[in-house]
Amino acid sequence: MRVIKKLNNCVALCIDKDHNELIAVGTGIGFGKIPYELKDLSIIQRTYYNVDQKYFQLLQCIDYDVIDVATKIVDYAKRRIPYELSSNVIFSLADHIQFALQRHQQGYMMNFMLTDDLKQLYKKECDIGAYALIIIQKQLKATLPDDEKYAIALHFINYETTNTKGQKADHKILDDITQIIESEFHIEIDKDGFNYARFITHIRYLMKRIVEKETLKTENSILYEEMVANFPKTNACVQKLCTYLEKKMNCQLESEEILYLMLHVNRLCMREGKSV
């Protein structure tokens, strides 16, 4: 195996005997003059193939122990969820864990607002998040807030949504919904931000209810009327979203679902700094 680039002292970019590029993890693999032929393969503890280049720079800043924990969490996840996971999810998760540890050390608490929706929609992923907190505490000696398990669950949820074949049609609908909102409010939404991730999770929840013919049971008719009266721009946007969804998903949205849409479109746009 040929080591061609040091990422940190324990992580390096390598080429195997079949000329495939991989990330190798092992004690001291990043030492020595690069490039070099690695003769003692016994020092390699983990190998990762098909890693996106965008993670190369990231790996220079992530502790080996955190990568090891993220790998064990993903190994656990692979036994519990029906879709395949690539090496990339390991490194995005490792980045999240390292940042969560930094926040924890600084005493910064993040209030996660999606717990009820995630518990209903993604029980397996939430269970993985709970396991993650256990192994983080055991190996990294850090007790993260309980809400952190939902943030970890989102890594697997988002990976499923963007990478599994069965989700491609849903992904197109989500893209179209986003474009309608951007057009109506003349904004460019930060697709990598937490606000958007939260919004998309709520829209997936709505789509799941439509497919399963479930309806929200609320007593919010007064709130609906107030929203329509007080937020005419939001109402106009949501009416377009309803027309689109009803045509695309062959459904009829009731006032409870329209209110649900209005609340989340409103919050998204306000968090994006747009007057509604």
Image: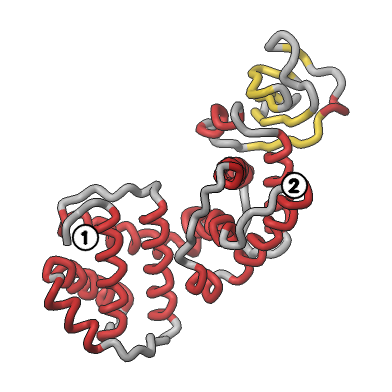
Q: Quadrant of residue 66?
A: top right
Q: Quadrant of the C terminus?
A: bottom left
Give how far apart the Cα atoms at labels 1 and 2 are.
46 Å
Label 2 crowd (10 A; few <14 / some 14-19 / many >=20): few
Front residue of 265 and 100: 100
| Amino acid under disc 1 | Ile
Label 1 crowd (10 A; few <14 / some 14-19 / many >=20): some
| Residue 25 percent coordinates (x, y) | 74, 31
Residue at (33%, 64%) from the top-left corner?
173
Q: Residue furthest front?
A: 107
Residue at (31%, 76%) from the top-left corner?
260
Q: In the rendered view, would you say 60 is above or below 162? A: above
Secondary structure state at the residue bearing disc 2:
loop
Q: In the rendered view, would you say 48 is above or below 237? A: above
Residue at (80%, 18%) from the top-left corner?
38
Report the disc number at residue 180. Answer: 1
Q: Give the number of the mark in front: 1 or 2.
A: 2
Front residue of 247 and 209: 209
